[in-house]
């Protein structure tokens, strides 16, 4: 098991986990982790999340 508590550990595990970036669009546009899923916090609070894979943490 990898160390997901560090940015490198999380990046190394992107093939097996889903990294959700809950920042606003302008923040996402300014830079992001390759492979991250953009889902703004307002969308999550509104019930979004159905697009996430149920078989991946």
Image (cartoon, grey):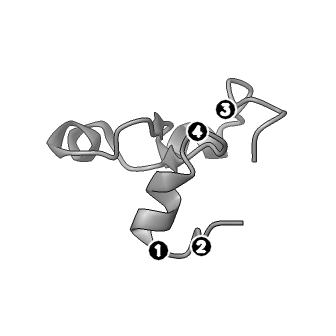
Rendered residue at 30%/37% (across/down) = 25
Q: CA distance from mark 2 to mark 1?
A: 6 Å
Rendered residue at 61%/42% (across/down) = 18
SS label for mark 2: loop
Rendered residue at 41%/67% (across/down) = 7
Q: Position of residue 17 (x, y in %)?
A: 65, 45
Q: CA distance from mark 1 to mark 3?
A: 26 Å
The residue furthest right is 55
Q: Residue 35's mark?
A: none
Residue position marked by numbered label 4 in the rendering:
15
The answer to the question of whether label 4 and label 2 lie on touching residues, with beta carbons closer than 8 A, is no
Q: Earlier in the sequence, mark 3 or mark 4?
A: 4
Does 8 sit left or right of 16 as displayed?
Answer: left
Q: Earlier in the sequence, mark 4 or mark 2?
A: 2
Disc number lying in front (3 or 4): 4
Does 12 sit left or right of 44 as displayed?
Answer: left
Q: Nearer the viewer, residue 28 or 35?
A: 35
Is residue 10 placed above or below 13 in the rendered structure? below
Q: Residues within 10 Å of mark 4 (few under 14, many from 20)?
A: few
Q: Residue 3's mark?
A: 2
Rendered residue at 38%/50% (across/down) = 23
Residue position marked by numbered label 3 in the rendering:
48
Q: CA distance from mark 3 to mark 4?
A: 22 Å
SS label for mark 1: loop
């Amino acid at each position: 098991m990898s160390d997901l508590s560090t940015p490198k550990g999380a990046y190394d595990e992107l093939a097996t986990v889903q990294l959700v970036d809950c920042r606003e669009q302008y923040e996402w546009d300014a830079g992001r982790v390759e492979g991250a899923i953009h889902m703004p916090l307002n969308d999550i609070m509104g019930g979004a999340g159905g697009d996430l894979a149920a078989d991946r943490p």
